[in-house]
Amino acid sequence: MNHKRNTDPMINSARCGAKTRTGTPCKSPAVHGKNRCRMHGGAEGSGAPKGNKNALKNGLYTKESIEERKQLNKMIKDYKKALEELE
Ligand SMILES: [Zn+2]
């Protein structure tokens, strides 16, 4: 198990986090630019096209609303900090 062979890039590559039938994470290397391996939805051509609204329920997790919440939380954080400095 102590090869001189350089496998670091392979070992350090992004891993698939899908839950397997045994309940453990998959750990296979994820497909480039995706969070899942080729067996768990990372394969080419799989998944919905960008901007698809088929699963939209209330828009709570759209890119825009996530970004909006992030901005708001940052503002609140900044204000709190400013308030603390005033004391
Ligand atoms: Zn996987």
Image (spheres, grey):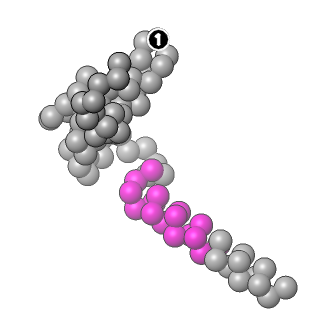
Is 20 placed left or right of 28 in the picture? right
Residue depicted at x 39% and y 23%: 26
Judge whether 37 appears above or below 69 on screen: above
Query: What span is colored magenta in the figure?
Result: 61-76
Instruction: Give the quadrant of the C terminus.
Output: bottom right
Residue found at the very far left of the displayed protein:
45
Q: Write down the quadrant of residue 12 in the picture.
A: top left
Residue found at the very far bottom of the displayed protein:
86
Residue behind label 1 places its C-beta within 8 angstroms of ligand 1: no
Whole-percent x, y for residue 48 in the image: 24, 39
Q: Secondary structure at mark 1?
A: loop
Whole-percent x, y for residue 2 in the image: 35, 23
In depth, the one of 72 and 27 nearer the eye is 27
**Residue 66 part of the magenta segment:** yes
Name the main secondary structure of what is drawn in magenta.
helix
Whole-percent x, y for residue 30 in the image: 29, 34
Q: Write down the quadrant of residue 73 in the picture.
A: bottom right
Residue depicted at x 45% and y 50%: 61
Q: Amino acid at mark 1?
A: Thr
Residue depicted at x 53% and y 63%: 69
Instruction: Give the quadrant of the N terminus.
Output: top left
Judge whether 64 appears above or below 6 on screen: below
Is 68 placed left or right of 39 in the picture? right
Q: Residue at label 1?
A: 22
Determine if residue 52 is in view.
yes
Q: Write down the quadrant of residue 31 in the picture.
A: top left
Determine if residue 41 is in view.
no
Whole-percent x, y for residue 37 in the image: 28, 29
Residue found at the very far top of the displayed protein:
22
Residue depicted at x 41% and y 31%: 17
